[in-house]
Amino acid sequence: MRALTWHGKHDIRVEDVPRPEIVNPNDAIIEVTATAICGSDLHLYHGRVPSMREGDVLGHEPMGEVVEVGSGVETLDVGDRVVVPFTISCGSCWFCQNDLYSLCDNSNPNAELAREVMGHSPAGLYGYSHMMGGYAGGQAEYLRVPYADVGPVKIESDLSDEQVLFLSDIFPTGHMAAENADIDEHDTVAVWGCGPVGQFAVQSADMLGADRVVAIDRVPERLAMARDHGGAETINYEEEDVYDRLMELTGDRGPDSCIDAVGTDAHGTGVVATSDRVKQRLNLEDDRPTVLREAIRCCRKGGTLSVPGVYVGRADNFPMGPLMNKGITVKTGQTHVQRYLGPLLDQIESGNIDPSFVVTHDAPLEDGPELYETFNDKEDDCIKVVLRP
Ligand SMILES: [Zn+2]
Ligand SMILES: [Zn+2]
């Protein structure tokens, strides 16, 4: 079958790889009808995520049709149309039982690798390194779905693929980011990063009752999307000082909640951002925490910092003093996607939101390598790429 494979920094290829087979009785195989490139795939593209191997199949935002089920699968049948969450979860461990699906204790076969680095292993993820389980990803014609009774959500309405595909990751991720931001009715919420997750964080902050949402980026078309679709006020950080502007908007108080939807590859400006890049190149630092620093500086005292942006390792110059002295609460984590599938599918089915507004590129899988580059360079007004295997 055809699949997008990783071959090192800036080297994504379309190749023929073996079609996946049922390995365990609780597996299903889906024929992928639509799959997306995620902002976090760019961390792989930049060679920033450890334990990737040449030839690894990429992708963690797939949907498709069930074509085969293992003998132990009870809830899915051949022919079902499903969206598959990026987090692989067993459904029965303590973490899954407590709705902490992205922290599943059983789904990472390489848990020891992760334990060595982090102390404990989070859940396995599709197409996201061997430390995260070494699972083949969904930017391919077929995908093996382990724990098939726990992850996939069946789509029984006639919604289009692009309307439901983002239940796999970015819609729940933006939504959990907003939930983690502890939003109250009169709150001002600032969202750093207007990529797809940022767009859904803006939408969800509004859904959860925020009084005002301020979106921060440097790409004009992304800021325009946050304005037009999310009703956000916007700050272009290349044109305005973010701290000054946020203080002006909030009467010097600062936003009640700050959401970092950027993560490890923040651009940033000035001397500190340059120093981060140098340290990263010398392997003295893994992450560039530009947004974390700025958000902690801007957040109101006693406010909340929610971090859906992906970080991979160590970050320097982390402002622990300001964080502590300002009494800021930090909430973060990979998304517990399974927790949100039902409620967010309801929102889509009832017409409250149509997530397809983020799609700017829709192309055959064969165009994948080129579109990784386009997406990375933010060329051609690219915000979200959907691929059709
Ligand atoms: Zn993703
Ligand atoms: Zn589990």
Image: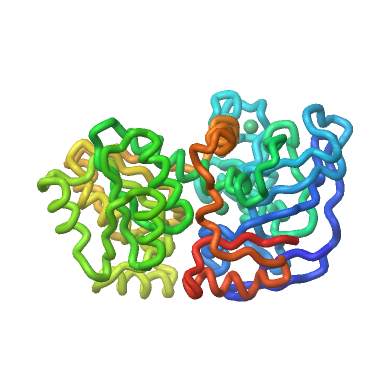
Above/below status of 30 relative to 362? above
Farthest-out residue, left? 251
Does residue 47 appear to the left or right of 251 in the view shown? right
Q: Position of residue 94 (x, y in %)?
A: 59, 25
Please state which of residues 34 and 122 is positioned toward the viewer in this rendering.
Answer: 34
The reply to whether residue 228 is in sight is yes
Question: Relative to residue 123, is residue 307 drawn left or right?
Answer: left
Q: Would you say 83 lies left or right of 218 here?
A: right
Q: Position of residue 58 (x, y in %)?
A: 67, 60
> Observer-nearest residue: 123 or 262?
262
Which quadrant is the C terminus positioned in? bottom right
Query: Which residue is found at the position 87% from the left and 42% from the top?
Result: 68
Question: Which residue is at 79% across, 33% downward?
Answer: 76
Q: Residue at x 31, y 67 (%)?
A: 268
Q: Quadrant of residue 112?
A: top right
Let me know if residue 331 appears in the view: no
In which quadrant will I find the N terminus? bottom right
- Quarter where residue 153 is shown: top right
Residue 11 in percent (x, y) is at: 63, 75
Q: Nearer the viewer, residue 357 or 53?
A: 357
